[in-house]
Structures are given as structure tokens and as C-alpha cells.
Image (cartoon, grey):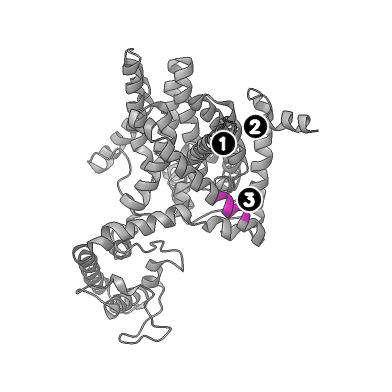
Amino acid sequence: MNRKLRALLLCDISKWPYWISVAFICRILFFFLVIHFRQYAKFDGFWGEIRSDSRDYLLPFDNFIKTGSYTPDYRMPGYGLLYLPLRLIFSKAVACNVIIIIQLLLSTVSVYILALCAKTIFKHQSIFYLTYYIYVFSSFSSLVDPVILTESISTSSLIFSVYFLTDFFNTNRSKQLILSGAFLTWTIFLKPVFCSLIILFFVLLVVAFIRTKTKVLPAFLFLIPFLLADGIWTIRNYIIYKQVSPLTRTVWFPWVSSSYLLPTAELVEAWGGDIQFVEPTADTYWFINKKPVMIGSDKNNDTVPFPAYIYTSQFNRDSLKLVKNMIIRIQVDSSMSVLQKKQYQDVIILKLKRYTQSIKTEKPFLYYVRSNYKRLIEFVFSMHTISRLFINNFITRFYSTYYYCTVFLSLLGFLLLIPFIFKLSIESVVAFIPIYTILIHPVFIKFSENRYLIPAYPFMIICASYSILWLYHRIFKEKHQPN
């Protein structure tokens, strides 16, 4: 029995139909679980979920089909590679159903591909099995497969890119570099925040070529897909806007960046608060929830839900209550003219910017250190998706523990991989991607929503697997040493 179980669990790595079939069974269970316990909206005929951002990825292509114009265009068109050809043939609901099926299939294959990446990089069969089983039973990434968002596809695409990059060092086939560049380009067109990985991957290639004393010219094959795709996108943007915009023109939605919403978010960011306007528990939501507050009152229904340490010589609780009431008047007072609303908004923006600058000037530790630390913790350790989905408390605790154990083991993996990072060897790529993702979102962009970690999570699993192997050999090597 033990021999049969061992043969089943440690099946030949090359038997890809077996590994992909097991992954498909696990992934489809999560797929139907999300659909069954759906927490977000959908539309008629669509099986999956629609989140607050979903419309922004579909609407430009619906408009393109109707009018020939890709608008609104604050999102890069990576999602359209799937949606547009399907939408030309099917209804919107059917096209979206096909998309989430494709996301499921790509996610399934990526489980096996990720494990192959780990084996290729670290030259050890055990790390294949560890990576495969940790990832295949993980809920964190698979919960977005039935959702119209870029997380699922960008995660799979990034895994494929790393696989072809690492496989090039085994096969020395130029085609692998082009494929790696193509998948990374698609990842960037889905999530422009990963554009820096183009530079990182290219540097790793050049360093590897220099070390082996071979010509670096093949490394430029990796750049061709991005240069072609982004070149076309940049030319298109220049023709329309007369400015060079190689990626997105704004991090924020246009209606946020052009109104009081942006300085509201920037003020909340200054002390490390939650800036999700659509979440009732978020700090920014308090400003726009249309519930007036009494200035000078600290009754339960009037209390400002912010910590006392955020205030400066430029603002206090009553200052924020005043701003909130001004925002509410813009929202609900139909007697105000357009000019009056603009004047109110200008005053609100000036006040909020002054408050933010005062935190930056008077409380630099809060602004530069404490707020970033708070966002980092929220980004890495919050588990909103799991807690919302699983009704059973035991399952919730199990998968929360599963996630936290993976995170802590990956942190150990980061430390163990530091020598590879300094050497800029190919092993460093599995640590670079999570480290970059964890820094770029909460520290530089100042976004702490946990779902943005999803594309980097598979590489955290490789780091966790590496640390498990290290601990295993460390413990058992010492155990079997002679006295």
C-alpha cells in the first residue's frame, strides 16, 4: 500500500497528463466553490463573478466593436487578447463564460509548469513535488479563476514567461527567449506594474551570457515581443494624445484623479489607511458615505474613525468633519450649480492637500515609515477573499493557516536566496518577483489590497519549497552525523 501510494504521489515528473489531470481536479473544485458561494455581482447568463474593476476591462472592447474606438483607454488592452475575438463571435455572457474556462485551463497547466520551473532552476526533483503539491492545494490564486479580472491570466502568463526563460538555459533554443518575452509582454499589458521585470529578466540574461563568455546578442530576442507590442501601443497613444505614453497614462481612474477623491486617498495613504472607496470598512469610504457628522460632537454616530496620532497643526477631527460635510453637499444638494460645486471641490482639494503635506512635514516617521509598514502588513497578511468565501470556520482557519505558513516559509526562502540575488544568477528570479511585488504596491504605489499579490504568490511557493528542502537537509544531515 505504501509503495503504491508513493508511486502515485511521486509519479514520474515527465508524465504531464497525470500531473495536469490532478491539478485540473483541484482547480475545478475551487472554481465551482467560488461560483456556488458567489459574493459579488454577475449578469444574466454569466456563471462567474464580476468585481468593481471588471467593467473597465470589457467596456473598451464593447465600444471598439460598436464604434471602432478603444475607449475608455486608461486600461492597457491585455485582456482583449481573449475577450475581443470571443465577443466578435458570441454574446457578452458566453464570451465571459469562455474566458473564465480559459482562465481555469491556463491556471491548471500553470501548476505543472511552475513545478517544472522549480526543478529546472534548482536541479532537484524534490522541489518539483513540493512546489506542485503546495500550489495545487492552495486556494489563494485559484479563487480568482472564475472572476473577470486580470489576476488569473497574469499569474499564469508570468509563470509561463519564467518557465521559458529558465528552459532556455537548459535547451539554448532562441525560441524560448521569444516565448518568454511574449508571455511577459502579455503580463505587462494585463498589469503594467510588472514592466520593470522586462529589465530584470534582460539583465539576468546578459549577465548569464557574459559569464559563459558567449555573445549577448540572443538576449535581445527576449525584448522583441515587448518592443513590437508596446511600440504599437505607444504610437497609438501619441496619435490620439500627442504625448509619449508607453504604458498607462494614470494609476487612478480618471474620475478619481480629476476630483476630490484623489486628494482624499492621498491623505488616507499618508497615515497608512485603507483607500478602497467601494469598501464600507475603508477609511476613504467615511468621507463619501453621505452620513453627515456634527462638528464639535464626539457622539458614537459622529466619531471620526481615525487614530488620534494622525492630526497635525493644520487639521483635527473637526477639520475632517467639515471636509466630509462639504463632500456630502456636493453629492446630494441638487440646488447647487455646477460652478458652486466646482468651487466647493477646489476648496476641498486645497484643504486635503494641505493636511497631507502637514503629515509629511510634521510627522515624517508616520508618513515614510509607519504608513508603509502598515500597508506592507495589510498587503501580505490580509485574507479578505478566503474569509468571505468559506462559510465553514474550520475551512477558513485551515486555508488561512495554509497561506500564512507558505508566506513565512517563503520569507525564509528569500533570506536563503540572497546570495543568488547578489550574483544575479537565474535562481534569483523566483525571489525577485515576490520582493518586487511586495514593495511596488504598498510602498511606491501605496496600494495594499491583497489580491495584487496573487501573480507573485506562485514564486513565493517556490521560495517556500526551497526553504523546506533546506530545513529538511539541515535537520536530517545533522541527525545522521556521527557523534
Q: Which residue is mark 3?
A: 47
| Proximity of marks 1 and 2: CB atoms separated by less than 8 Å | no
At 24% from the left and 39% from the top, the residue drawn is 244
Between marks 3 and 2 in the image, the one whose residue lies nearer the viewer? 2
Q: Determine whether the residue tagged by mark 1 lies in a helix, strand or loop.
A: helix
The quarter in which the C terminus is drawn is top right
At 47% from the left and 55% from the top, the residue drawn is 381
Gap in angstroms between the C-alphas marked 3 and 1: 44 Å
Q: Which residue is mark 1?
A: 472
Q: Is residue 399 magenta?
A: yes
Name which of mark 3 and mark 1 comes first in the sequence.
3
Residue 187 can be seen, yes or no: no
Name which of mark 1 and mark 2 comes first in the sequence.
2
Q: Which disc, if any, is residue 20? A: 2
Between marks 3 and 1 in the image, the one whose residue lies nearer the viewer? 1
What is the magenta range? 398-403
Gap in angstroms between the C-alphas marked 3 and 2: 24 Å
Q: Determine whether the residue tagged by mark 2 lies in a helix, strand or loop.
A: helix
Between marks 1 and 2 in the image, the one whose residue lies nearer the viewer? 1
At 67% from the left and 55% from the top, the residue drawn is 36
Quarter of the view holding residue 220: top left
Quarter of the view holding residue 372: bottom left
Is 357 placed left or right of 246 in the picture?
left
Is the residue marked by circle 1 packed among few (<14), some (14-19), or many (20+) residues within 10 Å? Answer: few
Quarter of the view holding residue 24: top right
Q: Position of residue 477 (x, y in %)?
A: 56, 31
Q: Determine whether the residue tagged by mark 3 lies in a helix, strand or loop.
A: loop
